[in-house]
Image (spheres, rainbow, N blue to C red):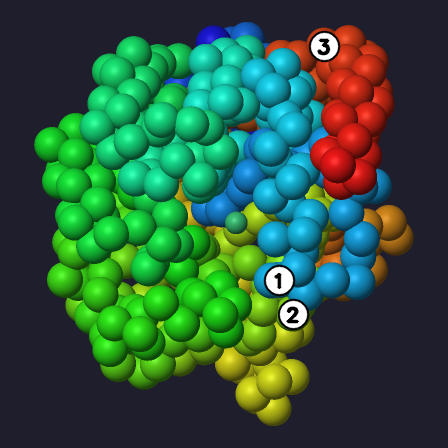
């Protein structure tokens, strides 16, 4: 299919951060084949099969969420808003996750994807996917949605953490390998299967080495929750080793290694992450809501650590909207550092697009509007009245827009949402199933809490 998008203001996020006013972009099959001024782009196609008039819209690369838990959605309304990380996790999230079954897992993922598509996310890294929540169901839900995703299967040498008896190391890595072989590359290459071992210090060091060796053997990515709360430092302090040195020692450094949070780390750790080409998935809303602390993001950016953004889970954020994270990150770090340039507008937009693509090892395919890249893109309506939007497009996108401004979504050259109507999924059916499952989950959760 060929799609011509015209009359838009393009924020390309290319190496020069080019902004093209009254421009156009042409998609052929799954790729961008031309972009620039309207006449030049139109001269390259006689009859596009689809024309989108994006007057009064920005055209952006699709947003990338580098840390999301599709399995947490049905926790909405069940978890209090006034608990900090340790209690939030131990008293609430662990019991919540223990009552979910495979049908809950699939429905939860579908609900997250509805919200991601509606708010302009086209690619995501799904974190902490448990076998008992239905790996196949989640992958099939992603395939139906048309989204691009890296799905990180949780692997552990601790049956307690897997919440399932008998999940020993051999079992968990073996399961991950067969899951990888079955689904990696599915959906015309849109699905990648990754691995995720537990927080540092919660498994034996040798297990991280084994998981890392498997990721290398499969040539795939890994993600990990990394120094989110102050208590995460304790196991490593007991071992007398810093987080960066531990990660280095057990082979967790490298490209396509995405560490979520990175709050409680030192300058030496940052140097190790930069040298080791690790990416950080910064989750500013979660960090604020469950009182994790403040990650040293401006220092990381200055030291060339690749920093992407994540919405994390539902009850630590309540929304799956990368626009909000692109706004929150500069607001938070600029005030904390008493420096209005600690995170620039350009940094914020890159964190939600190109840096996310780089974290997921996809910078050559997505993350910017450039000829030859995959056609993952979104149109975003300027806020009415349009005062100032044309003059200051970048400021408008970061500080004024939210996911509700997203109008059209194209992924891999296919129209997934047009005029806010999602075409790839049956929205009413999903909402009905969500209501049904949310009631069941709520009953199971209440019973678990009172037992
Ligand atoms: Zn998380």
Residue ID for mark 1: 85
Q: Can residue 91 be seen in this view?
A: yes
Dot 3: element: loop
Kindly identify the residue that appears in the image at 54 percent across and 42 percent down: 68
Nearest to the eye among marks 1 and 2: give it: 1
Q: Distance between the residues labelled 2 and 3?
A: 37 Å
Out of 286 and 92, give the one closest to the viewer.
Answer: 92
Residue ID for mark 2: 291
Q: How many neighbours does mark 3 have within 10 angstroms: few (below 14), some (14-19), or many (20 or more)?
A: few
Quadrant hosting residue 33: top left
Which mark, by number, is residue 441?
none
10 displayed left or right of 107: left
Q: Distance between the residues labelled 1 and 2?
A: 6 Å
Q: How many neighbours does mark 1 have within 10 angstroms: few (below 14), some (14-19), or many (20 or more)?
A: many
**Label whose residue precedes the other's in the sequence (2 or 3):** 2
> Residue lying farthest right?
385
Q: Are marks 1 and 2 in contact (CB under 8 Å)?
A: yes
Residue ID for mark 3: 426
Dot 1: element: helix
């Amino acid at each position: 299919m060929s799609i011509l998008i015209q009359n838009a203001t393009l924020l390309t996020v290319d190496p020069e951060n080019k902004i093209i006013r009254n421009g156009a972009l042409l998609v052929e099959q799954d790729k961008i084949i031309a972009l620039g001024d309207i006449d030049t782009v139109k001269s390259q196609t006689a009859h596009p099969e689809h024309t989108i008039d994006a007057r009064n819209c920005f055209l952006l690369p699709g947003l990338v969420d580098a840390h999301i838990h599709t399995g947490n959605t049905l926790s909405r309304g069940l978890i209090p808003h006034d608990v900090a990380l340790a209690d939030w996790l131990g008293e609430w999230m662990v019991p919540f996750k223990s009552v979910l079954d495979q049908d809950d897992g699939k429905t939860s993922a579908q609900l997250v994807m509805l919200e991601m598509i509606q708010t302009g996310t086209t690619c995501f890294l799904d974190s902490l996917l448990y076998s008992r929540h239905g790996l196949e169901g989640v992958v099939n839900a992603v395939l139906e949605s048309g989204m691009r995703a890296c799905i990180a299967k949780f692997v552990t040498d601790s049956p307690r953490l897997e919440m399932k008896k008998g999940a020993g190391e051999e079992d968990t890595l073996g399961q991950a390998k067969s899951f990888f072989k079955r689904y990696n590359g599915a959906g015309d290459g849109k699905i990648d299967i990754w691995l995720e071992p537990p927080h540092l210090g919660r498994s034996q060091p040798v297990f991280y080495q084994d998981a890392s060796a498997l990721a290398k053997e499969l040539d795939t990515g890994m993600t990990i929750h990394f120094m989110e709360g102050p208590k995460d430092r304790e196991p490593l302090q007991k071992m007398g080793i810093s987080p960066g040195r531990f990660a280095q020692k057990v082979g967790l450094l490298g490209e396509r290694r995405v560490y979520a949070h990175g709050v409680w780390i030192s300058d030496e750790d940052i140097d190790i992450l930069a040298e080791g080409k690790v990416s950080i998935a910064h989750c500013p809303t979660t960090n604020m809501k469950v009182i994790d602390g403040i990650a040293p993001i401006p220092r990381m950016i200055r030291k060339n650590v690749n920093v992407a953004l994540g919405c994390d889970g539902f009850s630590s954020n309540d929304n799956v909207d990368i626009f909000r994270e692109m706004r929150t990150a500069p607001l938070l770090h600029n005030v904390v550092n008493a420096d209005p340039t600690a995170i620039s507008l350009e940094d914020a937009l890159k964190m939600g697009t190109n840096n996310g693509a780089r974290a997921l090892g996809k910078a050559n395919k997505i993350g910017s509007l450039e000829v030859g890249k995959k056609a993952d893109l979104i149109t975003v309506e300027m806020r009415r009245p349009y005062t100032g939007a044309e003059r200051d497009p970048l400021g408008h996108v970061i500080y004024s827009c939210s996911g509700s401004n997203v109008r059209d979504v194209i992924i891999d050259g296919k129209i997934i949402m047009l005029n806010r109507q999602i075409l790839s999924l049956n929205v009413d059916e999903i909402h009905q199933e969500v209501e049904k499952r949310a009631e069941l989950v709520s009953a199971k959760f209440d019973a678990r809490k009172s037992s």
